[in-house]
Image (spheres, helix red, strand yellow):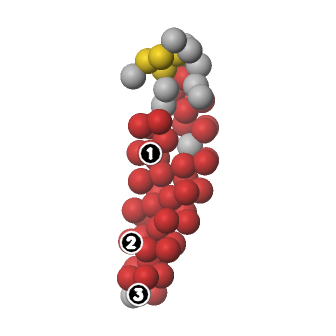
Amino acid sequence: MTTSSGPRYLTLRLLCANAVGMVAFLSAFVVAEDFAIALIAGLIVGAIGYVASSAVVDYAAAGAGGEHD
């Protein structure tokens, strides 16, 4: 999806957040064996992954020659 200001990387950010959130959920579920704790851990780490995905977006923007939001 491109806009007048260049490509947007929302999908890439969501994929990064989803990946780390799933790993955190599964890891916490294996360790704690409690669904609620695993769900909370997955959500928290997923949110951190969304914020930290700016490094991945910067890399993708540099490869595409575009700007990111």
Disc 2 marks a residue whose amino acid type is Leu
- Residue drawn where x is 61% and y is 47% of the image: 52
- Tell me the tag on residue 26: 2
Distance CA(mark 1)–CA(mark 2): 18 Å
Residue 29 image offset from top left, x and y in percent: 40, 79
Residue situated in front as seen by the camera: 31 or 47: 47
**In the image, which is nearer the foreground, mark 1 or mark 2?**
1
Quick one: label 2, few (<14), some, or many (20+) residues within 10 Å? some
Q: Are marks 3 and 2 in contact (CB under 8 Å)?
A: no
Quarter of the picture holding the C terminus = top right
Above or below residue 33? Residue 25 is above
- Residue drawn where x is 42% and y is 63% of the image: 23
> Could you say which quadrant of the image residue 54 lies in?
top right
3 or 1: tag closer to the N-terminus = 1
> Could you say which quadrant of the image residue 67 lies in?
top right
Q: Is residue 45 visible?
A: yes
Disc 1 marks a residue whose amino acid type is Leu
3 or 2: tag closer to the N-terminus = 2
- Tell me the tag on residue 34: 3
> Could you say which quadrant of the image residue 57 lies in?
top right
